[in-house]
Amino acid sequence: MINTLLGILPKRRWVYLAAAAVCAGLIGFALYLQYYKYQEPCPLCMLQRVVIILMGILFFIAGVHNPGRHGARVYGWIITLTGLLGAGIAARHVWIQYLPPEQVPVCGPGLDYILQTMPFGSAILQVLHGSGECADKSWMFLGLTIPGWTFLFFLFLSVLALLLPRKSS
């Protein structure tokens, strides 16, 4: 069944480039929400954006490179590991959003301040701890918040990256 589904996709190069375009579209939508709908991203949102950008760059490089089957496996694992990192961040964000109000972490400083005043490892741990603004569920579509949708996109793109080596170039 998977081979049948892969058979209807265009050549591997175009799928890589389409996945890069999806990542660019996700970032474009995030910027639209930020600058036109005035929804300020929390630190966890910013980390998810970084991972989406990284996945987009990796998909774009793979599309330009157009690797053979072995190279596609290497790209697939690198992209999948990156996507799973993003999915983990998004899952943590969703978990914070559904905490009872009394358990939501207090609002903390912004990401810029955290990165400027703490060592990088400590800053990442502080961001992953979450803060009050990370619990905001102001935008929803079909019952999912932004990090919920981001989680699904991370999983979809990770599975796609793992399946692409099985497709003929």
Image: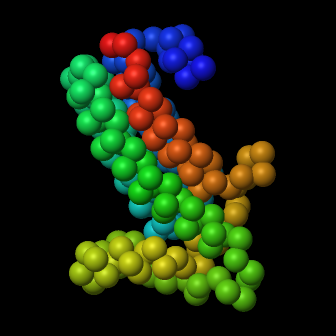
Give the image location of residue 146, x and y in percent: 62, 53
Give the image location of residue 145, x and y in percent: 68, 55
The image quarter containing residue 168 is top left
On the rendered structure, is 67 left or right of 99? left
- For the point 45% across and 11% down, the residue is 10
Residue 53 visible in image: no
On the rendered structure, is 76 left or right of 21? left
The image quarter containing residue 21 is top left
Front in this rendered view, residue 71 or 49: 71
Quarter holding the C terminus? top left
Front in this rendered view, residue 164 or 124: 164
Give the answer, above or below, for where 15 lies relative to 59: above
Quarter holding the N terminus? top right
- For the point 41% across and 80% down, the residue is 126
Give the image location of residue 75, x and y in percent: 29, 35
Give the answer, above or below, for where 119 lies relative to 53: below
Give the answer, above or below, for where 99 lies relative to 92: below
Give the answer, above or below, for where 4 lies relative to 44: above
Give the mark count.
0
- For the point 28% across and 83% down, the residue is 118
- For the point 33% across and 78% down, the residue is 123
Q: Which colour assignment does the render follow? A: rainbow
On the rendered structure, is 9 left or right of 14? right
Residue 20 visible in image: yes
